[in-house]
Image (cartoon, rainbow, N blue to C red):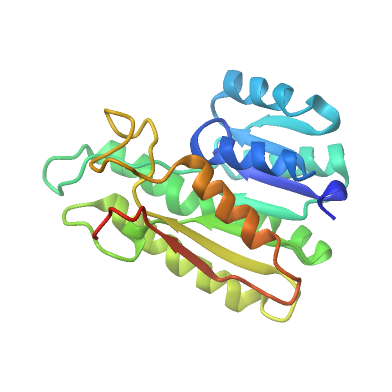
Amino acid sequence: MPADRTMLITGASSGIGAATARQAAKAGYRLVLAARSEDQLDALAAELGGPERAIAVRTDVTEWEEQQAMVAAGIEAFGSIDVVFANAGFGGPGGFTGSDPDAWKAMVLTNVYGAALTVRATLDHLRETQGHILLTGSVAGRRAIPGSLYSCTKWAVTAMGEAVRGEVAGSGVRVTLIEPGIVATPFWDDGKGPIDKPLTEDDVAGAVLWALSQPAHVDINEILMRPSAQAV
């Protein structure tokens, strides 16, 4: 079935987004890859088959016009959008008195406003295709981390997933919130974080593909996943 289906991924140039793109390409999806890192994005699109199978669209998710252009490029290239993974986001050091307010602003705009714009830009198309939207949340969006505004943004994404699901219930559109714990990414100075065996980007990508593989009448609302060594 995925051979004729198109997946749009924001934050696709690295990390969970890139890992999901690679697994989705193997499953037969055509891909609209969006991020701000143009060189990485172009390289990934070429790796995954070039313009017939994957296109790169340089996008700042905090800009509404760029989100609209991203969706228009996907429709022009492939004719439809069937799956959207609103994955763009980033974190930062904790502490309400030790963090940079400008960094806060960028994080809130990307993690919350950017995700909401992705929903708005794609939802009409997903209604037409009875498609699937996924959002990257976090364990930090279920357990408040002391002093972490990042955690606050992910609590907002948790609420967003449920708010969108309620709006589209009965339309055939499915909504899934992906909530990973500690994942080995460049976010950590040592690349893996505070435990010996964190989740990998492919672990999270596998959860995305699993949610997509369910029968059309089954909506996996949330996948909360931790490495087995993570206590909180």
Query: Can residue 62 be seen in the rendering of this structure?
Result: no
Query: Can residue 177 be seen in the rendering of this structure?
Result: yes
Image quarter of the N terminus: bottom right
In the rendered view, does 96 fall on the left or right side of 3?
Answer: left
Looking at the picture, does residue 208 appear above or below residue 60?
below
The one of 70 and 211 positioned closer to us in this rendering: 211
Residue 99 picture location, percent across and down:
18, 40
Residue 13 picture location, percent across and down:
56, 30
Image quarter of the C terminus: bottom left
Looking at the picture, does residue 191 appear above or below residue 210?
above
The one of 86 and 45 positioned closer to us in this rendering: 45
Residue at far left of view: 97
Looking at the picture, does residue 41 appear above or below residue 99?
above
Looking at the picture, does residue 224 appear above or below residue 76?
below
The one of 206 and 57 positioned closer to us in this rendering: 206
Residue 192 picture location, percent across and down:
32, 35
Count of numbered circles on the image: 0
Residue drawn where x is 67% and y is 79% of the image: 169
Residue at far bottom of view: 170
Residue 27 picture location, percent across and down:
75, 45
Residue drawn where x is 15% and y is 47% of the image: 95
Quadrant in the rendering for residue 120: bottom right
Residue drawn where x is 78% and y is 51% of the image: 81
In the rendered view, does 85 fall on the left or right side of 149?
Answer: right
In the rendered view, does 180 fall on the left or right side of 211?
Answer: left
Residue drawn where x is 61% and y is 67% of the image: 175
